Amino acid sequence: MDPVLIGIFNVLAPVLATLGVATVPIGIIWILKHHQFRMKELEIEGQRLAGPSTHQLAAIEARLAAIEAALHLPEHNPLASRAAMLEGPATTQTQEQQSAVRER
């Protein structure tokens, strides 16, 4: 190596070492703060996208009712249709009396 380069390296070595040692804690602090900031951002975004609010659900229901009214569709009530499926066939009293007589 050239003696001039060796002299430059001898002068720059303490400066570069000091710079490297000083930047490590700054880098660690920056990474920690950046991570905290990013986690807060993600938490806020998660709360915002968590689900529809009651106001949004009410607006959706109102739009759905308007569409059904425009199409003249019957009101959708799944519980009533299920209850109708659970009922047995219509019987007359004479059939009930006959079955009672047969069982005796």
Image (cartoon, helix red, strand yellow):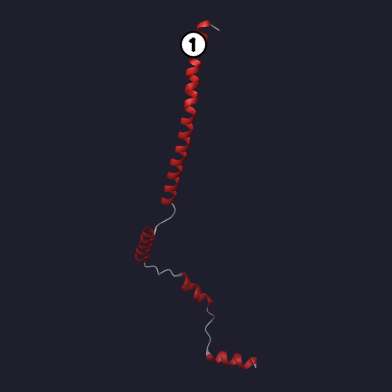
Relative depth, front residue between 31 and 63: 31
In-image side of 103 versus 35 (left or right): right
Q: Residue 83: x percent and y percent?
A: 50, 75
Residue 4 in the figure: left or right of residue 56: right
Q: Give x and y (percent) for residue 42.
A: 45, 45
Q: With respect to residue 103, does 44 lie above or below? A: above
| Quadrant location, the C terminus | bottom right
Which quadrant holds residue 65? Answer: bottom left
* Amino acid type of the residue that numbered disc 1 sits on in the rendered structure: Ile
Residue sitting at 48 percent across and 30 percent down?
A: 25
Q: Which image quadrant is residue 60 in?
A: bottom left
Is 15 rendered above or below residue 54? above
Judged from this view, the residue extending furthest toward the right is 104
**Quadrant, the N terminus:** top right
Q: How many marks?
A: 1
Determine which residue is flagged by label 1.
Answer: 8
